[in-house]
Image (spheres, coloured by chain):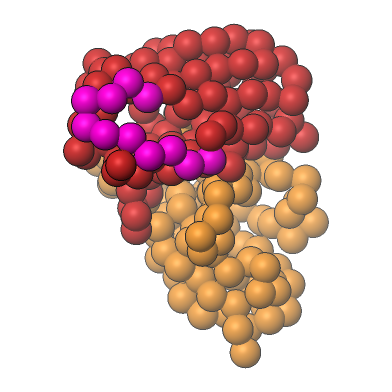
Amino acid sequence: QVQLQESGPGLVKPSETLSLTCTVSGDSISGYYWSWIRQPPGKGLEWIGYIYYTGSTNFNPSLKSRVTMSVDTSKNQFSLRLSSVTAADTAVYYCAREEGGATYWGQGTLVAVSS
Amino acid sequence: DIQLTQSPSFLSASVGDRVTITCRASQGISSYLAWYQQKPGKAPKLLIYGASTLQDGVPSRFSGSGSGTEFTLTISSLQPEDFATYHCQQLNSYPFTFGGGTKVDIK
């Protein structure tokens, strides 16, 4: 059974960098695309971008200047960094495996941006 | 970006009802559309991909249809566990985008 688990700080100060890691268990990270998706409280879903296990990426242009993603196949993990955060970045952040749709999801982690 | 418009945004229905949700794309996306179910406090769950292919383990009362710009998700006989919010997502072109969601509530 494939499982994903997000980890990282639940509170980030404005202008700082949000950093999250997704740990994959039950299958290898190799061979798949891995996405980050977020959902502000009470609102809809927003695709942040994906990273292939080789390290190639594709980001939402609305966030592209602030987003970095990386993958560590030895640890079966991939990561998200979002710089210069504001209150508008407060959301539940999900990691997911992409296969023509996001088939496996983490439980999500709420990240609040506040001083 | 491709805009996805879901309708209705909210619907009230009873157990056993047939429910249809529509997702319209601002431009053609072939069949690159997925449907998700999301319950409060939980991650979305993939129901349908490729516009009409049922994900493994999803009950057959769920079905999807459409191509191009208009798509539908149908629940043939609504069950108590189906009360949730449903989202569509296009995977035809970047950035992948989601519809605004349809909340299905108990009448």
Judged left or right of residue B60, residue A79 is right
Q: Is residue B10 magenta?
A: yes
Q: Position of residue B2 (x, y in %)?
A: 73, 30
> Which residue: 59% across, 10% down?
B67
Question: Which quadrant of the rendered structure holds the N terminus of chain A?
Answer: top left
Residues shaded magenta: B9-19
**Chain coloured orange here:** A
Residue at 25% x, 16% y is B60
The answer to whether residue A49 is magenta is: no
Find chain B in the image and tell me its colour. red
The part of the image, by quadrant, that contains residue A47 is top right
For the question of whether residue B95 can be seen, the reply is yes
Q: Is residue A30 left or right of residue B29?
A: left
In the displayed structure, A61 sits above or below B29; it is below
Q: Is residue A32 visible?
A: no
Residue furthest bottom as drawn:
A115
Q: Which one is in front, B16 or A57? A: B16
Q: Residue B30: x, y in percent?
A: 64, 11
| Residue A56 rendering spot, x and y as whole percentages | 64, 38
**Image quadrant where residue A102 sits:** top left
- Number of numbered discs on residues: 0
Identify the residue at horizontal 65%, vertical 32% (top origin). Answer: B4
Q: Residue furthest front?
A: B107
